[in-house]
Amino acid sequence: AQRVTQPEKLLSVFKGAPVELKCNYSYSGSPELFWYVQYSRQRLQLLLRHISRESIKGFTADLNKGETSFHLKKPFAQEEDSAMYYCAPPSGSARQLTFGSGTQLTVLP
Amino acid sequence: NAGVTQTPKFQVLKTGQSMTLQCAQDMNHEYMSWYRQDPGMGLRLIHYSVGAGITDQGEVPNGYNVSRSTTEDFPLRLLSAAPSQTSVYFCASSLGRGRTGELFFGEGSRLTVL
């Protein structure tokens, strides 16, 4: 079964500082890796997916197959980035999206 | 489009009571799923369905029952509520069709079992 590790439960950075949210996974059978975000009082939503190689709200995520990591990065954090972030690589069956335990990001003014 | 709609948003139960969390989507998605969200444990898959009439267990299925009689609806039943089932429950759907795609989530249902 897929195991997903987000080592930081809480992460605080100052506005304008770079931010990196770490994600490591155990199974690399599919190129479809996702980051989901939950802003305060909003529903979970897709932030970005690896396969489309896009940048959303200034965030990018680099897939490192050798390290089986999919860290989320942004060069200059904004206060509106404060949210809970979940890494989600699919399981081997591709029917069950496995979520990490989440990282609560707080961007301080 | 309403997207994914969950009801109720809040519920308090006593141990041993049963209830059903409703989930409906209007996007004609094949895939629907239920997750529970607990502090420090992220989202854990309870049950999922790849189409009407087909359901399967996820990571934490015990104490929960599901059915999928229509494409639109995927109710989650708690058979005999226990305090360990106190959680926030999310229903999610995706287009499916053989590959994992973007999940669309409901707003969540906060359940407290006393």
Image (cartoon, rainbow, N blue to C red):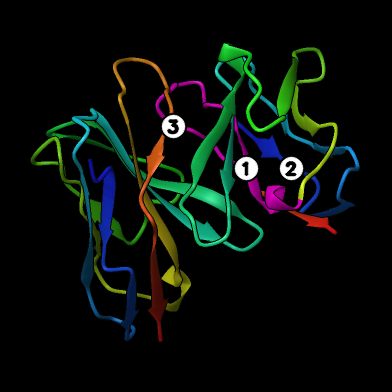
Q: Is B111 displayed left or right of A7 in the figure?
A: left
Residue at (75% x, 19% y) in the render: A62
Q: Quadrant of residue B77?
A: bottom left
**Amino acid of disc 2:** Gln
Residue B73, position in %: x, y?
Answer: 16, 45
Q: Give the alpha-carbon distance from disc 1 to disc 3, as whole Å.
A: 15 Å
Q: Is B105 displayed left or right of B73 in the figure?
A: right
Q: Give the alpha-carbon distance from disc 2 to disc 1, as whole Å.
A: 8 Å
- What quarter of the picture does the N terminus of chain A occupy? top right
Q: Is B3 displayed left or right of A33 in the figure?
A: left
- Tags 1 and 3 both on a single chain: yes
- Tags 3 and 2 both on a single chain: yes
Q: Name the N-terminal-most of marks 1 and 3.
A: 1
Q: Which residues are magenta?
A: A79-101
Determine which residue is flagged by label 3.
Answer: A96
Determine which residue is flagged by label 2.
Answer: A6
Q: Name the N-terminal-most of marks 2 and 1.
A: 2
In the image, which is nearer the foreground, mark 2 or mark 1? Answer: 1
Q: Mark 2, chain letter?
A: A
Q: Mark 3, chain letter?
A: A
Q: Give the alpha-carbon distance from disc 3 to disc 2, as whole Å.
A: 18 Å
Q: Is residue B81 magenta?
A: no
